[in-house]
Amino acid sequence: MSRLAEGLTLSGLAMQLMGNSRPASGAEHHIAHFLEMRQLLRGERPSLHGDKVGVATLVMIGFYQKLFEKRREPKPIDLGLWEERLRGGYGQLAEGFLRAAPLEKGEGKTAREQYEGYLEHFDAFAQKAASLAAKKADFKRMIQEAGGPVTREGIGASRQDMKDAMLCAFLLRPRYSALRMAFRLGILEEIADEIFA
């Protein structure tokens, strides 16, 4: 319990220092929020946010492996196609998100600069992805020991819900997450297809 309290305290301090939730809210949280919105729009009672984050964390471990298993050249992005996909994913909420975080927005850097950063740090990221993958069974066990679900069924999400979340969640915050990195590289759909084949 003391390790949990220490972790919560440190993440709280990190958020305070940053002035936002970025240190404690990455792609797994964005996936959880997307699933919550989808369930609410369908008139369903959403499962707990923490349960969704736990399941999404396990999914994102696989995503990081795919993203850093080989260096990838950027592929062209059809912004019109993606806007339609996001409108389908977010329904009536899409326009607000598209205004807040336009698809062409580069988070202060050009796509080329982001790609160069991806290449510069690729080996370190690949090592971290491999380290996470090696601990995935431990993370799963810890979630189960805490009484949390570890499958999409446990949070009331279909395979399509999970795939849509992976494809659409990067739009939730104007932040450069691994999901947005894959989007900017033009490989987000490819990775989602591999994970949810």
Image: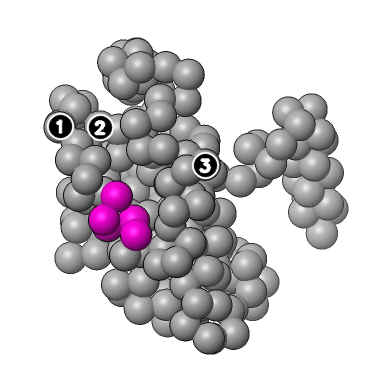
Q: Quadrant location of the N terminus?
A: bottom right
Q: Are marks 3 and 1 in contact (CB under 8 Å)?
A: no
| Magenta highlight range | 83-87
User: Whole-percent x and y of residue 18?
Assistant: 73, 28
Q: Are marks 2 and 1 in contact (CB under 8 Å)?
A: yes
User: Whole-percent x and y of residue 137?
Assistant: 45, 60
Instruction: Between residue 1 and residue 60, name the one nearer to us.
Output: 60
Measure how far apart labels 2 and 1 are at the Cα level: 6 Å
The local crowd at label 2, few if under 14, some if 14 to 19, many if 20 or more residues have their Cα within 10 Å, is many
Does residue 168 appear left or right of residue 66 in this picture?
right
Please say whether residue 104 is one of the residues in the magenta stretch: no
Q: Which residue is mark 1?
A: 75
Instruction: Give SS at disc 2.
Output: helix
Q: Which residue is mark 3?
A: 100
Query: What residue appears at the point 60 percent right and 64 percent down from the top-left corner?
Result: 142
User: Whole-percent x and y of residue 65?
Assistant: 31, 43
Q: Main secondary structure of the magenta part?
A: helix
Query: What residue appears at the point 27 percent right and 57 percent down from the top-left corner?
Result: 85
Which dot marks residue 185? 2
Q: Which one is earlier in the sequence, the residue at label 2 or at label 3?
A: 3
Residue 136 can be seen, yes or no: no
